[in-house]
Image: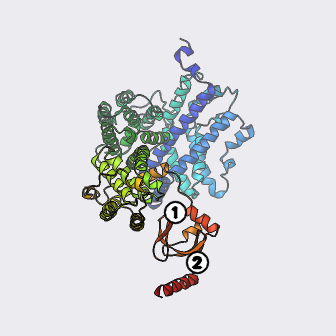
Amino acid sequence: MTPSDQHPDTDSKSGEDVYAEISSISKKMITEMLVRMIESAEDYRSWSLSDQDGSRMIKLVKHKQRIICSAFSFQLNKHFSEFKAGNLSLAQEKGARDWQKLGLSGANETAETDVLQDITDRYNNAFKEFDRTILKRLQACLKRSRASLYENPLQVKRLCESYQYAIDSLNLEVSYKIALYNLFADRFIEALGPLYRCIDQVLIKNGMLPEIPAARIHLRDIEGLSESNPPQSFSPDQSGCRLMILQRFKEQSRAPSSDFKNLFPELKQVFSENDLVDNDEQIDQLNLIFKLIFEDEDLPSPVKQQLARLQIYVFITAIQEDGFLRRSSNPARRLLDSIISSEVEIAKAGDTDFSGIDFIRQRIDAIASHEFITVDSYAEMLDAYQVFLNENEIAVRKARKMEATQKVLPLVKSRLNEITQPLKIQGTQLILFEKVWLPLMVQIALQQGMDSDPWHKSIAMVQKQVWSLIPKSNTEEQEELRKLLPTVAHSLHRAMRSLKLAEPLQQSLRDYLKLEQQNVAEKTARNIIEAKRKTRSLGQQSFDNLENTTEFDAMMQTGVFQIPKDTLEAFKSVKSEEPKKINQVEALATGDWVNMKRDGIKLLAKVAWKSEDSNLFIFVDRDGKRICEVDAGKLERQFESSEVSLMDSVSTDSEKTQFSFMKNL
């Protein structure tokens, strides 16, 4: 059998791709080992420090864990880059073997230098076979003709350099540094065997000098024991072996998949083959949990696909936290239960837009990108998931309501335009219908439909409102109008309360209606006296259904048709832009007097009513009779042409005094 037959994946990757993969695997596994080293510091008893200093050191390294891992990873990456570039000169290479040339010089650092040198000397013989074989295979990846042992990025000395660089970033005293070097030697370098085996096997698998046999560890025991002949009491480092296996499973969880499966039966088999039986209980418990998840027919498949990616991470947390799975309140279990119950409920309701599947995918992508996670990661994801569901549901409902409003609004406006056409012909402003009746009819259409009883009652009430704003031409209609005006005013008030409009706006619209009704009553009286029938055709508009408005008033309960903010936003998105407010016009307030020219005659006019948005004004003369109603744009043009001018307070008081005197005479 040829080497290529033994290693079918040889041609699948280039040498540089294999080198990049080795660099990535090394950084991930070394970071995991650093984390475990730091977590195990609490039970380390070889600090050469007092108990108080030892406790302080434990707190420090745990607090600075991310800094240590990040700095170590940075330096390791630099070593891999230097090897690939092949630019390490012979002089640098020789100088690097001397710790003094690495910045450790001076009397105070002598002890630190001795410790680092002792560590590298102590493990040179144990890992020398790996140093040579891994170096040759890395050379094969990059097709380098020559390289020294020191250039190997994974050599013990290079790893010590990376750790020394990470520790330097903490600015510690030499005694504390020495304590951390001892921890590094006993808890990190002692566990390098599985890392070296994994790297060597990956290189062989990818066809890098497969004819060279896999390297072995030469135990540094004083009896000269070798790995091939260990004593009966010797057992391999199970934590390192377990770490290597889990790393392979973690790689499968990084990329989203269109499929899902329970990984725990396979994981248990692999652990058993490597004599790892300490975690059978956790594997069996999680196997049952995820088996039930994947067999749940109500849970959508996309959710199962994402939860499947959490299997190994939950297992890692379970073996790190004693009794983790037995606690019903553990964050991982609560996260799974919450996602399952929420997503099943959403699926049963048919509201797939409310689902948090996209959020789950993004969060698991983030978790998979980390070298390690903590129990807090599950709690944070659970809190964020619940917040997302609430906000997403609100956003979806708001979008749906806005979409429905945008569809209904043109239909309601069209129907309202038909009814108010007579008012447009006679030039009456439609502010009451825009502010009250249009929003009310839209709300009724959305809540009850345009074929409901409340809709028809509202249409009838709008028709009464229109009829009451058209001047009449005979005594019968005048009497009917007199009876209807209070009823219409009351119904408008009820409609505004139902919408829960702001009280200042309600009062402004009541004042406006009062002025309009007064104007209609005066014009009706003049029409009858002068026998003018100019508005007869408008007055005869088909509003025969003038029955009692009690039913409409009863329907208009306070707040029953209150307009939500999202509906108001939909109004704004459909309605044309409001005209720009004009500062000079805005300065006018109800009760202010102005000079006004009409047909060449100068008049003194008072602002009797002003709309809330300053877009419409009603002026009356000294007797309180309406002179005109003007919109903001036209009024501004009249100001510019001097047809209308403001009166100062002195002139106003003089004019009013003169008028009062003449009236008394």
- Of all residues shown, which one is farthest toward the front? 531
Relative depth, front residue between 469 and 23:
469
| Mark with earlier residue (1, 2) | 1
Kindly give the residue lying farthest to the top in the view shown.
1
Q: Which residue is mark 2?
A: 647
Of tags 1 and 2, the one toward the viewer is 2
Amino acid at dot 1: Asn
**Amino acid type, label 2:** Met
The answer to whether 313 appears left or right of 117 in the picture is left
Would you name the residue on which mark 1 appears? Answer: 615
> Callout 1: 10 Å neighbours few (<14), some, many (20+)?
many
Q: CA distance from mark 1 to mark 2?
A: 21 Å
Q: Position of residue 301 (x, y in %)?
A: 37, 31
Instruction: Using the rendered image of the protein, determine whether residue 506 is visible from the camera's viewpoint.
Output: no
Instruction: Determine whether 191 is above or below 430 in the image.
Output: above
Mark 2 surroundings: few (<14), some (14-19) or many (≥20) residues within 10 A: some
Say whether residue 609 is left or right of residue 457: right
Residue 449's spot in the image, x, y percent? 32, 45
Q: Provide residue 401's location: percent of width, then percent of height.
A: 40, 46
| Image position, residue 429 (x, y; %) | 47, 59
Task: Name the secondary structure under disc 1.
Answer: loop
**How many marks on residues?**
2
Looking at the picture, tell me which residue is in the foreground, 465 or 217. Answer: 465
Quadrant position of residue 500: bottom left
Q: Residue at x 40, y 59 (%)?
A: 470
Can see residue 137? yes
How was this image coloured? rainbow
Q: Is residue 436 left or right of residue 587?
A: left
